[in-house]
Image (cartoon, rainbow, N blue to C red):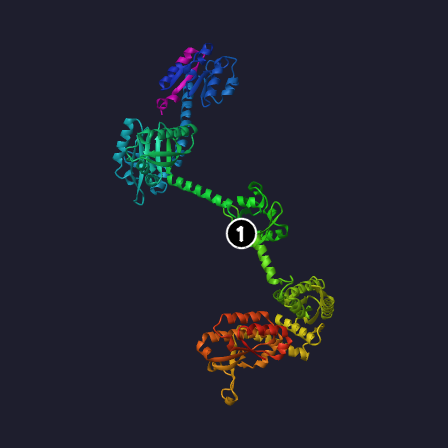
């Protein structure tokens, strides 16, 4: 290659010559070889002016030729400066003048190595040419390395085509991957193989690029080795070489970009669909407030077409006041550079609406605000709903605070979260003083552990609802009985678990319940427990005895001579005697024992965990206590005795009824054996067995009355001349005329007739005869009222009465009330009384007979 073929920068040579003539001769010689030498001048002429000369200081030189004798002068500094500026600067030292005093070990030569030396002009020319060529080859190698790197790492395919032969002379790896060719397969391949019908397009592309002075691109399809078409973007340029020009083709795969473009288009279409069909209003403006774009909902809300709004201002769309407020909103967004939310109440065509509008900045690629976006939501209905909700909440708060119940919300750690006004006032606190305090400060100390356990279980067991009753303590320490309903609100992702507690004051109801319970279990006259409560406690004791084989005892007490006091001094005196004697007996029993009034002048004592021998001592103590008791009434003093039946209560005692029956039977034996004594029940006792048999009839009689298994028969009363005609007792209807006597009969559970001798003695002994006599009287009166024809034919009906009935004032009043309310003539009724009963109860019998005779009834002894 001639020197003229090198780039201009590599042809420049700087000459520093001590001998000017020699320097010019060298300069001419270099110029003849196509180089561009520049002479700096002799050493004594190189001064500061040369250092400020741009042609020298700022110029770029491939080679520096310096006279050896100049290195120790100011020219030496220039050499070092030029080498520092361009470390690749080649230096050739002219040693031809042979001045003494300068050696190859000069400091300048040492610092500027490597360098070449020459003694004459020809050698200098050869050294310069060699240096220029070396610089050119170094630069060419770097360029080739850079091109190789670009060629290998480029994401675009690079083809070099020989335009004359239309063949590929070079291809980078990316082209091979793009077109499915192995390395080397593309070399010398016809360009049309991969670029069908593209050569003319390449020529036009190159021509257009040359004319315009810039690269043009063209989109077309390349053909892969398998014959598939690949869309590419192609750019081409001419590469001049020493032999011939070549065409460099860049190929960019458009498949990914086309996919991306399609995805972008689809995304834009989706965004546009959302934009146009969004239920909110959307507008985009420039920083001056001019509309750029609005969605359909925005245009429809203002009665405009989407196309007519862009270019207009807010004042063209909104009323003046609203437009000013909106512009101020937009200016705030421009000032603060962030989204700002505001509400607007807008009146249009007589209708007011509320809009919630968010204005936000739109930034360009540089991050500067280029516009303002707005999203508006019509919240008119929401505002109305909020107003209605606020009103509802206000009403609810009023109901909540003034409800007659106490409402609490309690956290899992038992602290009070909220309480209604009524609850705080009712307990004597302010709402503020209760909130944050533990709920336990309101619970009575005796109920604290119970309430803590129940509320703790509600949280631990996730119990939805529950009820409990306990005591609360007011601030003044007064106590309330509370019925509490609890409801658990479970823990959520946004709120911890809470317990809603509703408390109602049930103190009055509780006290009333306690009073009713007391009345139901206690005798109103004496304050002792009654028969029902004694039976309940006896049932519990029996269960205990069966469980742990413990021993207990039951006493049945029946006062002796009480009837004398009651008949002599009246019921008031009798009641007072019972009250006083109850207190006396109460003082003699243990605290754990039960003293009960069973009815009339009968008492019971249940002694728990008491063996029979100890129970006998207690029973005799009670007997002596009653015996020693004196009752004073209207200047009279009376004494009474008591008959006591004692029965052990063990695991073999059976039922409550059997235990009471045994004690009652033992009591009657005590009476029969002389009264005022204690008799211990023994199952093998014949007397007790008989009494026990009679006692069994008591239950049967009561059951028969409840199940209506009694019936009436009649015994006709006729002259002797008619004896034998219908002489057997029979039912009422056939003999409902003439004169007959009523007879009481009983059917057992199987329907068989029970003879009166089997049940009447027991009824007489155990005071059931009055109940039976009432049943007979009620039955015959009802039957005669229901059969008026038979009543008309009736001459006389005879009714037997027991001694207990004629002595019972209530029974007398019952008969009188039935006579007063019936159509049965009193003169058709005849009551039969035994002489023994009349004599035993003479006063009562006289009063009974006199009263009913006054109504017209007949009597027979």
Residue 693 visible, this orientation:
no
* Disc 1 target residue: 486
Q: Quadrant of residue 304?
A: top left
Q: Which residues are magenta?
A: 1-24
Q: Residue at x 53, y 18 (%)?
A: 105
Vertical position of residue 273 compared to residue 690: above or below: above
Vertical position of residue 324 compared to residue 437: above or below: above
Residue 158 in the image, given as x and y percentages of width and height: 35, 35
Instruction: Looking at the picture, tell me which residue is in the foreground, 147 or 350.
Output: 350
The answer to whether residue 705 is left or right of residue 618 is left
Residue 550 in the image, given as x and y percentages of width and height: 68, 68
Instruction: Looking at the picture, tell me which residue is in the foreground, 448 or 721.
Output: 721
Residue 852 in the image, given as x and y percentages of width and height: 55, 73
The quadrant of the rendering that contains the N terminus is: top left
Q: Secondary structure at mark 1?
A: strand
Residue 283 in the image, given as x and y percentages of width and height: 34, 34
48 within the magenta span: no
């Amino acid at each position: 290659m001639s020197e003229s073929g090198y780039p201009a920068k590599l042809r420049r040579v700087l000459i520093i010559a001590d001998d000017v003539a020699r320097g010019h001769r060298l300069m001419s010689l270099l110029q003849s070889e196509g180089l561009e030498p520049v002479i700096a001048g002799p050493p004594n002429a190189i001064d500061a002016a040369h250092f400020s000369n741009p042609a020298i200081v700022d110029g770029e030189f491939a080679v520096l030729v310096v006279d050896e004798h100049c290195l120790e002068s100011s020219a030496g500094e220039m050499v070092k400066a030029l080498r520092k500026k361009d470390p690749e600067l080649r230096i050739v030292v002219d040693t031809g003048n042979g001045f003494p005093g300068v050696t190859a070990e000069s400091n300048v030569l040492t610092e500027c190595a490597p360098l070449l030396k020459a003694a004459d002009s020809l050698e200098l020319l050869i050294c310069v040419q060699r240096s220029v060529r070396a610089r050119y080859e170094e630069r060419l190698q770097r360029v080739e390395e850079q091109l190789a790197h670009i060629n290998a790492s480029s994401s675009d395919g690079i083809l070099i085509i020989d335009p004359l032969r239309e063949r590929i002379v070079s291809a980078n790896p990316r082209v091979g991957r793009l077109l499915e060719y192995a390395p080397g397969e593309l070399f010398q391949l016809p360009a049309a193989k991969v670029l069908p019908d593209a050569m003319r397009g390449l020529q036009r592309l190159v021509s257009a690029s040359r004319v315009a002075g810039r690269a043009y691109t063209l989109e077309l399809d390349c053909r892969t080795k398998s014959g598939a078409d690949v869309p590419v973007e192609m750019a081409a340029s001419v590469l001049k070489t020493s032999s011939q020009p070549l065409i460099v083709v860049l190929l960019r795969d458009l498949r990914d970009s086309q996919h991306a473009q399609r995805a972008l288009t689809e995304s834009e279409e989706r965004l546009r669909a959302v934009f146009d069909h969004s239920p909110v209003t959307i507008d985009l403006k420039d920083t001056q407030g001019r509309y750029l774009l609005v969605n359909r909902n925005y245009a429809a809300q203002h009665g405009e077409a989407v196309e007519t709004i862009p270019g207009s201002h807010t004042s063209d769309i909104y009323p003046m006041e609203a437009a000013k407020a909106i512009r101020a909103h937009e200016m705030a967004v421009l000032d603060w550079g962030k989204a700002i939310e505001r509400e607007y109440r807008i009146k249009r065509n007589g209708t007011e609406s509320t809009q919630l509008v968010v204005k936000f900045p739109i930034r360009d690629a540089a991050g500067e605000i280029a516009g303002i976006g707005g999203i508006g939501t019509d919240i008119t209905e929401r505002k109305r709903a909020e107003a209605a909700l606020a009103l509802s909440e206000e009403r609810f708060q009023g109901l909540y605070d003034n409800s007659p119940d106490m409402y609490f919300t309690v956290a899992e750690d038992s602290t009070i979260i909220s309480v209604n006004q009524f609850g705080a006032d009712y307990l004597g606190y302010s709402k503020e003083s209760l909130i944050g305090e533990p709920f336990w400060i309101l619970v009575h100390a005796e109920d604290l552990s119970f309430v803590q356990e129940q509320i703790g279980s509600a949280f631990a067991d996730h119990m939805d609802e529950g009820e409990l009753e306990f005591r609360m303590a007011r601030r003044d320490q007064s106590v309330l009985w509370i019925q509490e309903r609890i409801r658990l609100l479970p823990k959520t992702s946004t709120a911890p678990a809470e317990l809603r507690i509703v408390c109602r004051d049930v103190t009055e109801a509780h006290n009333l319940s306690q009073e009713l319970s007391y009345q139901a279990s206690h005798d109103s006259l004496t304050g002792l427990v009654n028969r029902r409560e004694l039976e309940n406690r006896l049932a519990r004791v029996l269960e205990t005895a069966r469980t742990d084989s413990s021993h207990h005892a039951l006493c049945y007490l029946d006062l002796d001579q009480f009837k004398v006091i009651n008949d002599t001094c009246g019921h008031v005196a009798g009641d007072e005697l019972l009250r006083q004697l109850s207190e006396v007996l109460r003082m003699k029993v243990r605290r754990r024992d039960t003293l009960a009034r069973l009815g009339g002048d009968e008492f019971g004592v249940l002694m728990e965990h008491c063996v029979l021998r100890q129970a006998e001592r207690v029973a005799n103590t009670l007997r002596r206590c009653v015996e020693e008791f004196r009752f004073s009434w209207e200047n009279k003093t009376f004494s009474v005795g008591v008959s006591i039946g004692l029965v052990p209560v063990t695991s073999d005692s059976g039922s409550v009824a059997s235990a009471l029956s045994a004690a009652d039977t033992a009591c009657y034996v005590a009476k029969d054996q002389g009264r005022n004594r204690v008799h211990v029940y023994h199952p093998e006792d014949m007397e007790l067995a008989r009494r026990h048999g009679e006692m069994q009839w008591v239950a049967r009689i009561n059951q028969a009355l409840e199940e209506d298994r009694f019936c009436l028969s009649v015994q006709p009363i006729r002259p002797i001349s008619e004896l034998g005609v219908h002489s057997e007792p029979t039912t009422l209807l056939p003999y409902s005329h003439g004169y007959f006597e009523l007879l009481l009969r009983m059917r057992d559970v199987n329907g068989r007739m029970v003879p009166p001798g089997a049940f009447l003695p027991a009824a007489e002994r155990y005071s059931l005869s009055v109940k039976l006599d009432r049943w007979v009287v009620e039955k015959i009166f009802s039957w005669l009222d229901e059969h008026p024809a038979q009543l008309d034919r009736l001459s006389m009906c005879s009714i037997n009465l027991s001694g207990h009935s004629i002595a019972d004032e209530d029974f007398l009043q019952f008969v009188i009330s039935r006579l007063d309310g019936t159509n049965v003539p009193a003169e058709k009724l005849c009551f039969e009384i035994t002489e023994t009963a009349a004599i035993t109860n003479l006063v009562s019998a006289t009063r009974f007979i006199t009263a009913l005779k006054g109504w017209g009834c007949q009597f027979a002894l």
